[in-house]
Amino acid sequence: MPSNLWAPWRYPWIKASKDGVHDCFLCDALRDDSAMDRDNLVLFRGDSAFVILNRYPYSNGHLMVVPNRHVHDLRQVSGEEAGEMHRLVQQSLDAMHKSLGPHGFNLGYNLGRVSGAGLEEHLHMHIVPRWNGDTNFMPVVGDVKVISQDLYDSYDQLWNAWHELQL
């Protein structure tokens, strides 16, 4: 018999649903300049792309690099957007190495729902830090992923590293 896993932080997102369709949280985070970027988990805003911490991470420090323009297909991204996204991926890797010290990374796009895209309408590159031994019995036995760091602690660590490297 399965036991319950409580995730109350997901309720506001579920409650905001309109007939099962959600607004684009990436566009909302980029557009919302009235709030502090920390509230929206935005680490960096560029001319044509930005970096945001994943609110529902696969591991602590899980980032996404996103074009500012709302596009869903990699083939729609301009050369300028692709270039800035690539530079932001490189800078994200530097910030993660400096602040979190991972042993490796998973990088990738999920294009289309069948590939695992939770938000298929707005293209984004995942950067997932990995550590030796970061998998354990929990996902196998309990179908549960353990995140070892508070989301905002991860944000603060990455933000500090990101902005130190920008100087």
Image: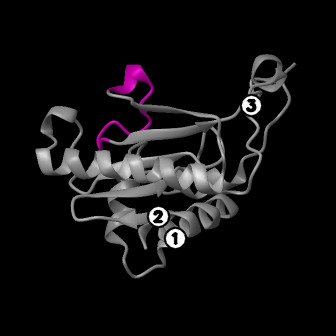
Mark 2 Cα within 10 Å, few/some/many (few <14, many 20+)? many
Disc 1 target residue = 164
Locate the N terminus by quadrant: top right
Disc 3 target residue = 134
Locate the C terminus by quadrant: bottom left
Label 3 SS = loop
Question: Which stretch appears magenta?
Answer: 112-123
Q: CA distance from mark 1 to mark 2?
A: 12 Å
Name the residue: 54% across, 71% down.
39
Secondary structure mostly taken by the magenta-highlighted segment of the chain: loop
Q: Earlier in the sequence, mark 3 or mark 1?
A: 3
Percent of width and height locating residue 6 = 78, 44
Amino acid at dot 1: Glu
**Disc sitting over residue 5 in the figure:** none
Label 2 SS = strand
> Does the magenta run of residues contain 122?
yes
Amino acid at dot 3: Asp
Check if mark 3's residue and mark 1's residue have beta carbons within 8 Å.
no
Percent of width and height locating residue 163 = 48, 70
Percent of width and height locating residue 4 = 82, 35
Disc 2 target residue = 43
Mark 3 Cα within 10 Å, few/some/many (few <14, many 20+)? few
Indicate whether 13 appears above or below 28.
above
Q: Earlier in the sequence, mark 1 or mark 2?
A: 2
Between tags 3 and 1, which lies in front? 1
Amino acid at dot 2: Leu
156 sits left or right of 91 in the view = right
Between tags 1 and 2, which lies in front? 1
> Does the magenta run of residues contain 90?
no
Name the residue: 48% across, 40% down.
127
